[in-house]
Image: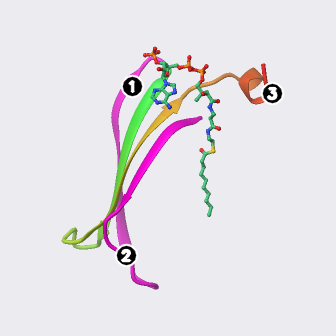
Amino acid sequence: MTANLNINYRRPIPLGSTVLLESSLEKKEGRKTFITCRVTSTDGSKLHTETSALFLSITASHLLGG
Ligand SMILES: CCCCCCCCCC(=O)SCCNC(=O)CCNC(=O)[C@H](O)C(C)(C)COP(=O)(O)OP(=O)(O)OC[C@H]1O[C@@H](n2cnc3c(N)ncnc32)[C@H](O)[C@@H]1OP(=O)(O)O
């Protein structure tokens, strides 16, 4: 479950362009998983978007309001 999501939009992505997404597992601490992601031009020279997020593992009962 997404607990926190940060997105920095650095440069617009032109319509129809192809981009490179690189996602990394930064660390895992118990139920917490920290992920980062970058969107760049395919040659890596232009940074379009960078994000970080925290995901928490949950049980099915959490989804049912338990
Ligand atoms: C055009 C289409 C676009 C579509 C976009 C789709 C985007 C999708 C976006 C989604 O993912 S939707 C889902 C959005 N997420 C939610 O609705 C989650 C709502 N929040 C919850 O259900 C609870 O807050 C959550 C399950 C995340 C955590 O509740 P818990 O009771 O399980 O955990 P708890 O609060 O005890 O925190 C556990 C640990 O996580 C840490 N923590 C929790 N929330 C945090 C947070 N927000 N930031 C930092 N740390 C956080 C907390 O400090 C603690 O750290 P320690 O274990 O070290 O003490």
Label 1: which secondary element:
strand
Using the image as rendered, state which of residue 54 and residue 25 is in the foreground.
54
Quarter of the image that includes the N terminus: top right
Task: Please tell me the numbered disc located at residue 28.
Answer: 1
**Label whose residue precedes the other's in the sequence (1 or 3):** 1
Q: Mark 2 points at which residue?
A: 12
Q: Where residue 6 sits in the image (x, y, percent)?
A: 42, 47
Residue ID at (39%, 34%): 34
Residue ID at (29%, 73%): 41
Using the image as rendered, state which of residue 64 and residue 6 is in the foreground.
6
- Based on the picture, tell me whether residue 28 belongs to the magenta stretch: yes
Point out the stretch of residues depicted in magenta.
1-30
Q: Name the residue under label 3.
A: 64
Residue 18 sits above or below residue 66 on the image: below
Q: How crowded is mark 2: few (under 14 residues within 10 Å), some or many (20 or more)?
A: few
Residue ID at (39%, 40%): 35
Label 2: which secondary element:
loop
- Residue type of the residue flagged with mark 2: Pro
Residue 11 sits above or below residue 7 on the image: below
- Residue type of the residue flagged with mark 3: Leu
Instruction: Choose mark 1 or mark 2, whichever is in front.
Output: 2
Q: What residue occupies the far left of the structure in this picture?
A: 45
Q: Residues within 10 Å of mark 1 (few under 14, many from 20)?
A: few
Query: Total label count?
Result: 3
Label 3: which secondary element:
loop
